[in-house]
């Protein structure tokens, strides 16, 4: 199983960014797929999950600004991030499962 | 929201000693509590799932216990490679949440 995140970068406050997680060795449509972030020098913060039934949920800190989605044909999960704020600066990880047993290496988002 | 509080924030121990990390929830997390290890510059790795279920490939010196609001991660016979930060994580209720982390240093 491999998860590879992409799409991070430097963005101004108020801007938008779309992260992508490409999966191999598993089907995103059959799994719970999450985004977890980690601000520099800080702990882990759960951001969002999309369940195998398509339902999605968000942390209060991103609700209304971020949208998780999946593309079954491409076997990818995305995170559309709008109205970005300084405190959204973090490494964003894609992970699979409930006990999150597979993680990508992360992609860095800097809002400044 | 289930708030997870880990104690201690920092644990220093010598090789071969036993380390115990506690994760306390402000409401019941059932057994939907998982433990991760993260080394600097790396992604987290799953150590224990559902409070006490071992993960294939994880050394047997890592074990978990507890249910409800009180959980424990125990590392027996500490090794130098166990120097890392450890996080608990609950999936009982949405939003899922993490503990703040416990850094384990090797003396």
Image (spheres, rainbow, N blue to C red):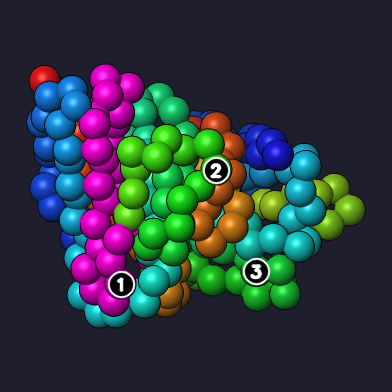
What residue is shown with label 1? B67
> Quick check: B66 left or right of A65?
left
What residue is shown with label 3? A51
* Picture quadrant of residue B90: bottom left
Q: Disc 3, disc 2: CB below 8 Å?
A: no
Q: Nearer the viewer, residue A41 or B28?
A: B28
> Quick check: A24 left or right of B28?
right
Q: Nearer the viewer, residue A103 or A77?
A: A103
Q: Residue at x 40, y 40 (%)?
A: B60
Prevalent SS, magenta region: strand
User: Could you say where residue B2 lies in the image, as x and y percent from the top left?
Assistant: 30, 73
Distance of label 3 from label 2 (alpha carbons) = 24 Å
Tell me the magenta residue range: B65-90
Q: Disc 2, disc 1: CB below 8 Å?
A: no
Of the two numbered discs 1 and 3 in the rendering, the one whose residue sits closer to the viewer: 1
Circle 3 crowding by C-alpha within 10 Å: few under 14, some 14–19, many from 20? some
Q: Is residue B15 visible?
A: yes
User: Could you say where residue A13 lies in the image, as x and y percent from the top left?
Assistant: 42, 45
> Quick check: B16 left or right of A102?
left
Q: Label 2 marks which chain's residue?
A: B
Circle 1 crowding by C-alpha within 10 Å: few under 14, some 14–19, many from 20? some
């Amino acid at each position: 199983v491999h998860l590879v995140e992409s799409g991070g970068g430097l963005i101004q406050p108020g801007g938008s960014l779309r992260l992508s997680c490409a999966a191999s060795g598993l089907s995103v449509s059959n799994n719970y797929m999450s985004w977890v972030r980690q601000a520099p020098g800080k702990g882990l913060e759960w951001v969002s999950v999309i369940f195998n039934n398509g339902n999605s949920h968000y942390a209060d800190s991103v609700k209304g600004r971020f949208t998780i989605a999946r593309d079954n044909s491409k076997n990818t999960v995305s995170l559309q991030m709008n109205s970005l704020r300084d405190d959204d600066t973090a490494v964003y990880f894609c992970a699979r499962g409930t006990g999150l047993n597979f993680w990508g290496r992360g992609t860095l988002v800097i809002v400044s | 929201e289930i708030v997870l509080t880990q104690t201690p924030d920092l644990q220093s121990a010598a090789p071969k000693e036993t380390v115990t990390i506690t994760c306390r929830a402000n409401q019941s997390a059932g057994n939907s509590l998982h433990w991760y290890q993260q080394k600097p510059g790396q992604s987290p790795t799953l150590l224990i799932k559902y409070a006490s279920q071992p993960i294939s490939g994880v050394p047997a010196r890592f074990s978990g216990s507890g249910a409800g609001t009180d959980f424990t991660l125990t590392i027996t016979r500490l090794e130098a490679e166990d120097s890392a930060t450890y996080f608990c994580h609950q999936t009982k209720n949405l939003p899922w949440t993490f503990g703040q982390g416990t850094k384990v240093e090797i003396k």
